[in-house]
Image (cartoon, rainbow, N blue to C red):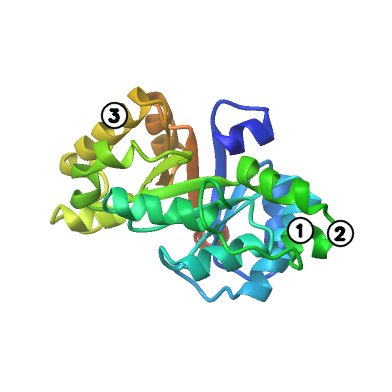
Amino acid sequence: MIIMKTLNIKTVVYGPFLKLTDPAIVEICAHAGFDFCIIDMEHGPIGYEQAQNLIRAAEIHDLFPVIRVTENSETHILKALDIGAKGIQVPHINNKTDAERAVKATKFNPDGNRGMCRYVRSAKYSSRKKEDYFSKANRETSIIIQIEGLEGVSNLGEILTVDHVDVIFIGPYDLSQSLGVPGDIHNQKVVKQMEKVVKEATKQGVEVGTFVESPRDAKLWVDVGVKYISYSVDVGIFYDACQNIVQNLNQK
């Protein structure tokens, strides 16, 4: 997994989803010791100019910046990469064709067909030698694809045959909805399907990630074999902290 090689510090990495647009949030996450952050453009108000500034903040503090794009779109992936995302997280991958589309949009030739432009932030506005930029981008960009429904789980075998996928990310909430138990991410129906994905992907040498909302759940999935742990969301973390403070203040 490229993010592991880049960080070169842990066998398991942790990072939150970000919906807030202030770069201070990124800096706080870095100072707190997170390994990466996922700038969430699928669920939330973040635009590309704002995302670019969040990436700048991440780079200053050696926090690995991932962008979850709105959809599996060549245009969305291209824009996220051009502003400097080191990882691309693509939602709702259901089959091999979906996975191949995400990879082709992320990689330059010969591995894909990402649109070429050196006059972007990721190429340091053309100051990077083109001989280095295109090949290095292919080597160093992480591709994280999200399996979020029964269709994706059913087609996991063929999805795992697609080259250059670094992480299979299990979306527990959408998976719970697909299984008819919306929001009940601890339901055994959901857990069993997630365990199935972890086992099959790990067997094929592909790392697995998922979303958790507590240290207990993080430990549970790390013990199962998950190595890319997305821990909660900035707004939820802040809410929980505020709620805890208010409850303590109101104790008599």
Q: Earlier in the sequence, mark 1 or mark 3?
A: 1
Answer whether residue 237 is visible to the viewer in this image.
no
Task: Using the image, determine if residue 110 lies above or below residue 124.
Answer: above
Viewer-side label of 1, 3? 1
Q: CA distance from mark 2 to mark 1?
A: 7 Å
Q: In the rendered view, tell whether residue 114 sits above or below residue 209.
A: below
Would you name the residue on which mark 3 appears? 200
Tell me the residue at 60%/33% (across/down).
4
Pick the residue in front: 58 or 162. 162
| Residue on which disc 2 sits | 127
**Residue 150 percent location from the top left of the image:** 19, 50
What type is the residue that disc 3 sits on?
A: Glu
Mark 3: few/some/many CA within 10 Å (<14, 14-19, 20+): some
Q: Nearer the viewer, residue 209 or 218?
A: 209
Q: Which residue is mark 1?
A: 123
Q: Is residue 241 left or right of residue 71?
A: right
In terms of image quadrants, where is residue 198? top left
Proximity of marks 1 and 3: CB atoms separated by less than 8 Å: no
Circles 2 and 1 in contact, beta carbons < 8 Å: yes
Kind of residue sitting beneath label 1:
Ala
Find numbered disc 1 in the image and state the secondary structure of the residue it sits on. helix
Rendered view: 72 above or below 171: below
The image quadrant of residue 220 is top left
